[in-house]
Structure formats: C-alpha cells, structure tokens
Amino acid sequence: MNLLQKGPRIYRDPRVIKKMDFLRKTRPYKWMIIVCAIIVPGLGHVLTKKPVRGLIYVFWILSMSYITFMITTDEMPLTMRCFGGIAVWIASVIEIAETDIFY
C-alpha cells in the first residue's frame, strides 16, 4: 500500500499519485542549480543535497570578506575590499559546475 493512499481523499486518486511520484523522481537541471549558486551562495550545494558543505562555504565567504575588508584601505572600491569572499564564492560556483548532480 502506498503511503499517499492513507492521506486525504484527493491523494488517493491514481492520477495525483502518479504526478507526485513523477515530481519526487525529478531533479533540477544543472544550469538551474548553477544559476541558484551564483545568486545565493551555498544554495547550489543545498540543491545537490550537500547542505553542510554549503554552510561551510557561506561561513568562509563571510569570514574571508571580513578579513579582506579589514586589512584594506578605505580608498579601495567595495568589490576589492571584499575580494576574499568573492574568490571563495567563485570557487563554490566552479565546484557546483563540475559536480556530477545525478549520482
């Protein structure tokens, strides 16, 4: 017996069960995960089912941004002052791009 058949009446409908099984088996496209990793740091790792690694990358991005921000002068642009975090962010996106998502 399927677990969904124990729920409310709508979930006992075979068409709904078939659609939910399809949604459970599908995974996001690789380009979609890369775009998410570019927009939000660490989200690409969460989508590839590695949330701890994503949190580690977010920690390193924040810490390296803080360190490079504190050791640079005020005359430098903000992007250069936070370049340590930007470099770690780029490394995380490259890692997501090279990861085999369908394991």
Image: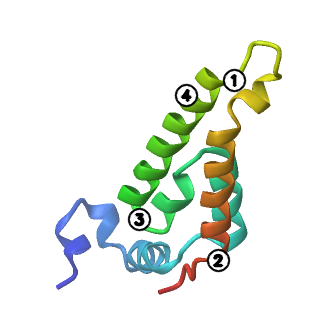
- Dot 3 alpha-carbon crowd within 10 angstroms: few under 14, some 14 to 19, many 20 or more: few
Q: What residue type is labelled 1?
A: Thr
Residue under the image location 68 percent in, 43 percent down: 86
The residue where tag 2 is placed is 98
Q: Which of marks 2 and 3 is nearer the N terminus?
A: 3
Measured as percent of width and height from the top left, residue 77 is found at 83, 22
Residue 73, quarter of picture = top right
Q: Which amino acid does label 2 sit on?
A: Glu
The residue where tag 4 is placed is 66
In front of the other: 2 or 71: 71
| Labels 2 & 3 near each other (Cβ < 8 A) | no
- Dot 1 alpha-carbon crowd within 10 angstroms: few under 14, some 14 to 19, many 20 or more: some
Q: What residue type is labelled 3?
A: Lys
In front of the other: 9 or 48: 48
Measured as percent of width and height from the top left, residue 48 is found at 49, 68
Q: Which of marks 2 and 4 is nearer the N terminus?
A: 4
93 sits left or right of 62 in the view:
right
